[in-house]
């Protein structure tokens, strides 16, 4: 979005489009077959600066505008309509209307009232937002057409739309209408970006400049035909020159406080891509809100598509990993088969020859390894043991997976309580047994001492 104040679309380049020359396009509708271009470039292409600046810059201080300012000041501060204390109430009422941006301010019986609009400097319902600056060049030839139709309807009838636009351009066979893209806008509107390619008799082709194409669309008869197709707005989508950007930033828009405008320039989050634009009134705020909501939905749709693509890629990755494992197994099998073929070939090649020393050495090593593998206490026994354990684990795992028992929570709680009581009873019994053992030890000790004493006496 950029530079669109109150227009139904929030796309690009409105101001630059409005400044395009009205008569710079002379090729549509002609049947000339000369080698020259069907388009006239005599009209200046830098008039966009003037138009863009006009949108933002304050008007010159003409006498009528000075009178307007004087009348506004009189209506807000010192009306003389009634000649009594009611003029003070009227002044407050005029101030309220000026703050709101609507109504008429009566202040003198002999002078017409002042019209209060939202562009007046006293209107409070203003803010400054930021819009993306277009990055396309005039040579790209991009022109935006806003249709009062839904995107689904535009897409379903895109071929008919292209043919209709070609007829609007005069049906010239050297011209081809192309649709760059479509986008949904609020209020069931659709933005269609088009460009026109012109083919010359020598076989070369070029895009018609955006300003030239827009100038043709702005002709009265062509504009009527576009309106019959459902077009509510047309504009170029071209980037602004550094001089245009500088003029836009230096001159605050009409009705915007220069201090607020300067602060908006300071707060610009990305001065290379964004430019401050005024938002006057609730309608403009609502429009931008709808556009923002529409863009959020488009972003969410794009995120959903990306998420689906990622899921599909993950599935493909899983399939690829499985195929890679399969190919590895197949490669291993083929390697073994190749080795067997090589062995048989080597056997046939060596048939009839005596065993060489290195071959005898390899045979001895292989016999040694084979003997170690076949030894009961060596690797073969361990391998058999591991295989038995694996079979048992697989068997018990299958049984456990098939036989699963579930215990009710209350029953499990009762079992825990019962086991706890049993544990406490066992602990108490163990303590009693320990005490009894201590008593038995004391009795035994006493008996031993008594026997010892009696033995001493009898001796």
Image: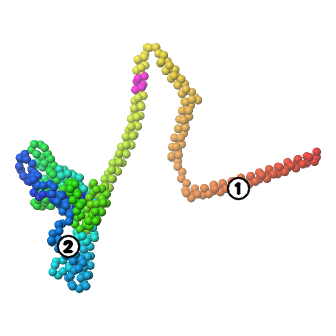
Q: In the image, which is nearer the foreground, mark 2 or mark 1?
A: 2
Q: Residue at x 16, y 49 (%)?
A: 207
Q: Mark number for residue 147?
A: none
Q: Main secondary structure of the magenta part?
A: helix
Relative vertical location of residue 66 with respect to residue 441 in this rendering, above or below: below
Between 192 and 249, which is closer to the camera in this rendering?
249
Label 2 belongs to which residue? 69
Q: Where is residue 165 drawn, in percent x and y?
A: 14, 54
Q: In this orientation, does residue 28 appear?
A: no
Relative vertical location of residue 335 with respect to residue 63 in this rendering, above or below: above
**Label 2 packing within 10 angstroms: few (<14), some (14-19), many (20+):** some
Residue segment shown in magenta = 338-343
Specify the farthest residue to the bottom: 84
Residue 441 placement, left or right of 133: right
Figure colour scheme: rainbow
Label 2 element class: helix
Q: Quadrant of the C terminus?
A: top right
Relative vertical location of residue 445 with respect to residue 361 in this rendering, above or below: below
Q: Where is residue 148 drawn, in percent x and y?
A: 20, 61
Label 1 belongs to which residue? 428
Does 218 appear in magenta? no
Q: Where is residue 34 drawn, in percent x and y?
A: 5, 46
């Amino acid at each position: 979005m950029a530079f669109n104040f109150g227009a139904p679309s929030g796309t690009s380049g409105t101001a630059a489009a409005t400044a395009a020359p009205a008569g710079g396009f002379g090729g549509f509708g002609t049947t000339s077959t000369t080698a020259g271009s069907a388009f006239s470039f005599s009209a200046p292409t830098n008039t966009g600066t003037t138009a863009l600046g006009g949108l933002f810059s304050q008007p010159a201080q003409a006498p009528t505008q000075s009178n307007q300012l004087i009348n506004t000041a009189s209506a807000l501060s010192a009306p003389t309509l009634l000649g009594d204390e009611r003029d003070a109430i009227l002044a407050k009422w005029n101030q309220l209307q000026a703050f709101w941006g609507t109504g008429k301010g009566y202040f003198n019986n002999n002078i017409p009232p002042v019209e209060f609009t939202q562009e007046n400097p006293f209107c409070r319902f203003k803010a400054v937002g930021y819009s993306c600056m277009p990055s396309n060049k005039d040579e790209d030839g991009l022109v935006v057409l806003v249709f009062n139709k839904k995107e689904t309807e535009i897409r379903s009838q895109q071929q008919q739309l292209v043919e209709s636009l070609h007829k609007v351009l005069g049906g010239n066979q050297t011209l081809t209408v192309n649709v760059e893209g479509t986008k949904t806008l609020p209020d069931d509107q659709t933005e269609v970006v088009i460009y026109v390619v012109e083919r010359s008799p020598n076989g070369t082709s070029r895009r018609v400049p955006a300003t030239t194409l827009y100038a043709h669309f702005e002709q009265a008869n062509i504009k009527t035909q576009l309106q019959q197709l459902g077009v509510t707005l047309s504009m170029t989508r071209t980037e602004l020159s550094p001089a245009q950007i500088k003029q836009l930033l230096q001159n605050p828009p009409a009705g915007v406080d220069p201090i607020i405008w300067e602060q908006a320039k300071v707060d610009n989050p990305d001065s290379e891509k964004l430019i401050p634009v005024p938002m006057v009134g609730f309608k403009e705020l609502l429009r931008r809100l709808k556009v923002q909501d529409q863009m959020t939905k488009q972003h969410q749709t794009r995120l959903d598509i990306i998420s689906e693509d990622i899921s599909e890629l993950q599935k493909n990755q899983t399939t690829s990993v499985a195929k890679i494992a399969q190919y590895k197994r197949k490669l291993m099998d083929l390697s073994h088969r190749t080795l067997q073929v090589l062995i048989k070939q080597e056997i046939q090649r060596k048939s009839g020859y005596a065993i060489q020393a290195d071959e005898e050495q390899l045979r001895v090593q292989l016999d040694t390894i084979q003997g170690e593998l076949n030894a009961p206490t060596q690797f073969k026994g361990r391998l058999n043991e591991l295989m038995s354990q694996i079979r048992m684990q697989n068997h018990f795992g299958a049984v456990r997976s098939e036989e699963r028992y579930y215990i009710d929570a209350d029953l499990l709680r009762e079992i825990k309580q019962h086991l706890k009581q049993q544990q406490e009873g066992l602990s108490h019994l163990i303590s009693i047994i320990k005490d009894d053992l201590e008593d038995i030890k004391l009795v035994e000790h006493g008996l031993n001492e008594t026997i010892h004493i009696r033995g001493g006496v009898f001796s």
